[in-house]
Amino acid sequence: MTAYAVLGPEQDVSPGRLTFFRDGTRWEVITYSADTIARAVTSISELAAASASAWHRRGLPAQDGGLTAVLNIWDGVAVAGAERAAAHRRLLRAAGLRHVVSRMAALEAEKALDSALSLSYTGDHRSAVLSAHVAVGKTIDAFLAAAGTLYADSTWRHRRLEALVSDGAPAPLTFDPESCWNWLSMRQLADLSPVDWTRGAVAFCQAMLDSMTVLLQNHHTCPDLVVQ
């Protein structure tokens, strides 16, 4: 479980992290300064307003932990209580976090898809499979962000997709968790040639990215889903 604390100017403690176990649960408490959160909100706002081409030259402040830190704040449990967490989440939502995270993941997915297609064209089909597999993960990240569920740990992709479905997914959700799991686990690779698997994965990603675009256009109908 990830938790976070915001340090006030009167607290003489350096930002960092503390990991411990309690009642069988692993807790990781990450501390941030109020200035760090303010800078994150500003960076998200600037990225949301920037053109896609400018994103290759911009990013969140690395010294503040980058996007992972922002997602920990969004998805973590505030030590000070739910009210503070909700306030931070409102700030990040208003800044455009859903759009930024979704587009960042989509850009990474598109880059991996281009690589998979190029590798397949040159005959390096095994490398194409690996690139397509990266694209599958990033595509699911992009789709889930557009649907309102954001997370820092990519190992939670399938769990979050299942939670999205069980909580009443926004339309158009045309992919069930089992379909996504088939591509994430590469289960079908045993029955398909590398060429056919890559083609199927590319088609899956392209269709899901199209759904992501629709979700972003209708983001006001998609509530933010934070799973603890």
Image (spheres, rainbow, N blue to C red):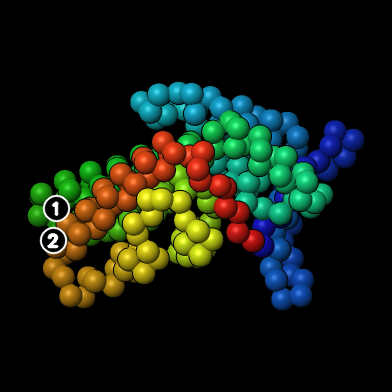
Q: Is residue 147 left or right of residue 30?
A: left
The quarter of the rendered structure image containing the N terminus is bottom right
Q: Give the residue type that dot 1 points to.
A: Ser
Residue 193 image-quadrant placement = bottom left
Is residue 201 something one can see in this rendering? Answer: yes
Q: Give the residue type that dot 2 points to.
A: Val
Which disc is residue 195 wearing?
A: 2
Q: Position of residue 4 (x, y in %)?
A: 72, 50
The residue lying toward the viewer, choosing from 177 and 51, is 177
The residue at 69%/34% (across/down) is 36
Residue 174 image-quadrant placement = bottom left
The residue at 47%/48% (across/down) is 147
Which disc is residue 56 wearing?
A: none
The residue lying toward the viewer, choosing from 19 and 203, is 203
CB of mark 2 within 8 Å of CB of mark 1? yes
- Residue extending farthest to the right is 10
The residue at 66%/38% (across/down) is 90
Is residue 126 something one can see in this rendering? Answer: no
Q: Is residue 100 left or right of residue 43?
A: left
Instruction: Give neighbour class at mark 2: few <14, some 14-19, many 20+ (Cα, 10 Å).
Output: some
Instruction: Give neighbour class at mark 1: few <14, some 14-19, many 20+ (Cα, 10 Å).
Output: many
3D distance between C-alphas at marks 2 and 1: 7 Å
Q: Position of residue 99 (x, y in %)?
A: 47, 37
SS type, badge 2: helix
From the image, tell me which residue sits under label 1: 120
Q: Position of residue 101 (x, y in %)?
A: 48, 41
Q: How many marks?
A: 2
Mark 2 vs 1, N-terminal side? 1
